[in-house]
Image (cartoon, helix red, strand yellow):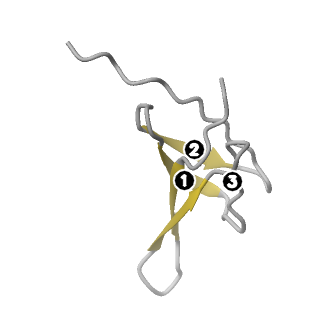
Amino acid sequence: GDPIFQAHLTLQFTVSRKFRRDKTYSLSAKTDMKGLYRFRDIPKGKIRLLVIADKHQTFGQEYEITEDDQLVHVKMKKPQPQI
């Protein structure tokens, strides 16, 4: 439940172009002290978010962005114990 400082974020999305191939974008950032980061100017549609943080399981999921300034909450899990 605590914020994760410096979690590595990768956001991927594809933009359709009329007379050319679709273009895929990949943006990277790290979270602040409050565990937050704001990606700006993301088009509406499907995105994929990947989150990597020390001492946590890697998280990846697709989301549908349907509104401006849409907020996505991610809850990270602790690693599985080694057997």
Number of numbered discs overlaid on the protein picture: 3
**Which quadrant would residue 81 be assigned to in this image?**
top left
Where is residue 47 drawn, in percent x and y?
A: 54, 53
**20 w.r.t. 76: above or below:** below
Alpha carbon distance from label 2 to label 3: 16 Å
Q: Residue furthest right?
A: 68
Relative depth, front residue between 11 and 57: 57
Residue lying farthest bottom? 19
User: Which is closer to the viewer, label 1 or label 3?
Assistant: 3
Q: Residue at x 57, y 60 (%)?
A: 29
Residue 37 falls left or right of residue 7: right
Q: Residue at x 61, y 38 (%)?
A: 4
Q: CA distance from mark 1 to mark 2?
A: 5 Å
The residue at which mark 2 appears reads as 63
Tell me the SS state at disc 2.
strand
Label 2 CA crowd tier, 10 Å (few <14, some 14–19, many 20+): few
Query: Distance from label 1 to label 3 (Cα)?
Result: 16 Å
Secondary element at tag 3: loop
Type of amino acid at the residue the image marks with label 2: Tyr
Q: Please name which of the two marks, 2 or 3, marks the residue nearer to the observer.
A: 3
Write down the residue under mark 1: 47
Compare marks 2 and 3 and give the one earlier in the sequence: 3
- Residue 37, disc: 3
Spot occupied by residue 58 in the image (x, y as percentages of width and height): 41, 37
Rendered residue at 62%/44% (across/down): 5
Q: Disc 3 residue type?
A: Tyr
Q: Tell me residue 30's x, y (percent).
A: 58, 56
Amino acid tagged 1: Ile
* Label 1 close to label 3 by CB (< 8 Å): no
Choose the circle earlier in sequence order: 1 or 2: 1
- Foreground residue, 26 or 52? 52
